[in-house]
Amino acid sequence: MFATTVSSGVIVLVGAVFLACAVEMVEALTIVFAVGHTRGWRSAFEGVIAAIVALVALVAAFGPALIHVPLSTLRLIVGGVLLIFGMQWLRKAVLRSSGLKAKHDEDAIYEETVAELRASGQTIGRDRVAFVMAFKGVFLEGLEVVITVLTLGTSAHRLGLAATTAGIALVLVAVMGAIVSKQLSSVPENAMKMSVGILLVSYGTFWVGEGLKVTWPGNDGFLAFFVAMYTLVTWGLVGLAKSGTPKTKVEAHA
Amino acid sequence: MSEKKPLPVRLLKGFAMFWWDFLVGDTPELFVSSLVIIGVIAGLRGAGDNTAAVIALPVLAVCALAISLKRAVNAAKKK
């Protein structure tokens, strides 16, 4: 029983962190490839390094403080954030699956970024535009990775496992990107985002309850019930959205 | 021409804007719903009703998601 409850919590944690980090990495990689191919790799890499340094500084500044927050308060705040964040992801994924929202297209984003970079003209010496573009892309996507790892890791008391899982996901996507030497447009992003949404909402529901001293039947094992329940609900909502969908699409944005 | 604000002010504003976009963005109903859910569950726990809290929390989350999706579908129909 103990092994079952521990493993279900760990599986949900690893799954959520891995998928969320992989998706964010794919998006960051698309921007870096667009900058590198269009304006040269030096400025792109400088932007990436600067963003990583800024993210590490943020983690060093705020990470240790999180450990000192009382666990029930931390779980309530984290649960609330994950509930909102998870529902946002799930909402977008359902809208995309039902055809109400254009799917996230890495090829289109790549082309759009390349056009934007070309329009800004070439510069002599240090390429500020390329640096800023690569920095912003990596920093903003990286910030979501940092928030996911810190919130999920600290609340579950498994920060090491969350950080390791994130590291594996980031390296795996980076290696895949380096091998194919282009943006990873064939990654099933919507399915991944839907899975992340389900896992985040499950964790969010669970931790909001824990933070408010709700006693879940089966303790951590109840997480598995939430994952199953939200999967069924998502499936139902996609069906409902499809049945009431006119043949038009709402605006597409990431 | 507007005067450029000092770096700490710009950083603070950027940080606040990030969290606003992150938590509220284009779905304020989900943000408000989450606060309502927390309030309701805190009330139920305060009244000592754990069973009602166990049932109400996921049910309210599903309702919030369904309402937000309904809004999006209606918005799409209007276009």
Image (cartoon, rainbow, N blue to C red):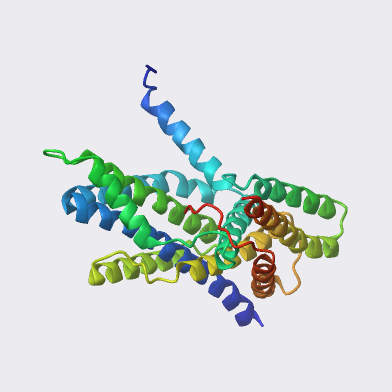
Which residue is at the front of the view, A10 or A87?
A87
- Above or below, comparing residue A240 to residue B75 in the picture: below
Residue under the image location 73 percent in, 54 percent down: A212
Which residue is at the front of the view, A196 or A63?
A196
- Above or below, comparing residue A45 to residue A129 in the picture: below
Location of the N terminus of chain A (image quadrant): bottom right
Which residue is at the front of the view, A28 or A158?
A28
Residue under the image location 37 percent in, 71 percent down: A186
Q: Is residue B25 visible?
A: yes
Residue under the image location 50 percent in, 67 percent down: A190
Horizontal arrangement in the rendering, residue B61 relative to residue A58 (left or right): right
Image position, residue A164 (x, y; %): 40, 67
**Which quarter of the picture shows residue B9?**
top left
Residue under the image location 59 percent in, 72 percent down: A9
Image position, residue A105 (x, y; %): 41, 62
Image position, residue A109 (x, y; %): 37, 56
Q: Is residue A72 visible?
A: no
**Which quarter of the picture shows residue A216?**
bottom right
- Above or below, comparing residue A133 to residue A85 in the picture: above
Image position, residue A234 (x, y; %): 65, 69
Horizontal arrangement in the rendering, residue A110 relative to residue A213 (left or right): left
